[in-house]
């Protein structure tokens, strides 16, 4: 059973449907994963450079993880291996980022 789609991807020229778990993002799974990998990689880079993390970035990464889990649940009966593998890889990266932050003195950049 497939989850209902929330329309077509907002990326120009992309005819892919939007999974229900990504309706707020208005992106197909492929484009969502591309963006989420980029955000995670950029955040890791800032952490390694010793720069502060923006609370909005942290919220975004948490919402990425939640969207991935919801999408995995929706597709549990009909997984596409390449998407499932990318989602699991991203969850692992987010978990590694969490561990990195927990074991290093990473600061949150809180506005005054």
Image: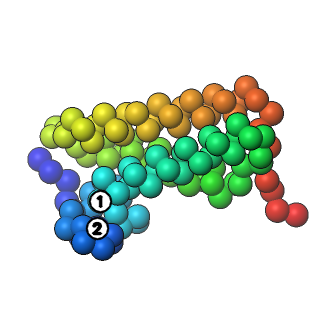
Q: Answer with mark 1 or mark 2, whichever residue precedes in sequence.
A: 2
Relative to 73, say whether 21 is above or below: below
* Rendered image quadrant of residue 32: bottom left
Say the numbered circle drawn on residue 28.
1
- Residue at 50% across / 50% down in the picture? 38
Q: Which residue is mark 2?
A: 9
How many callouts does the rendering have? 2
Where residue 19 sits: x, y (%)? 27, 57
Where residue 33 sits: x, y (%)? 38, 50
User: Where does the C terminus fall, quadrant-wise?
Assistant: bottom right
- Residue at 27% across / 42% down in the picture? 83
Q: How far apart are the alpha carbons under marks 1 and 2?
A: 5 Å
Q: Is residue 23 visible?
A: no
Are circles 1 and 2 on residues that touch, CB within 8 Å? yes
* Rendered image quadrant of residue 79: top left
Q: In this view of the protein, which residue sits in the foreground, 89 or 19?
A: 89
Left or right: where 85 falls relative to 61: left
């Amino acid at each position: 059973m497939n989850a209902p789609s929330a329309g077509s991807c907002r990326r120009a020229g992309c005819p892919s449907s939007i999974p229900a778990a990504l309706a707020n993002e208005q992106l197909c799974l492929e484009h969502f994963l591309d963006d989420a990998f980029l955000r995670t990689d950029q955040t890791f880079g800032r952490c390694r450079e010793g720069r502060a993390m923006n609370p909005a970035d942290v919220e975004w990464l948490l919402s990425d993880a939640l969207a991935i889990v919801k999408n995995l649940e929706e597709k549990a009966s009909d997984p596409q291996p390449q998407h499932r593998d990318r989602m699991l890889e991203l969850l692992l990266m987010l978990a590694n980022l969490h561990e990195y932050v927990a074991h290093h003195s990473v600061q949150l950049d809180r506005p005054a």
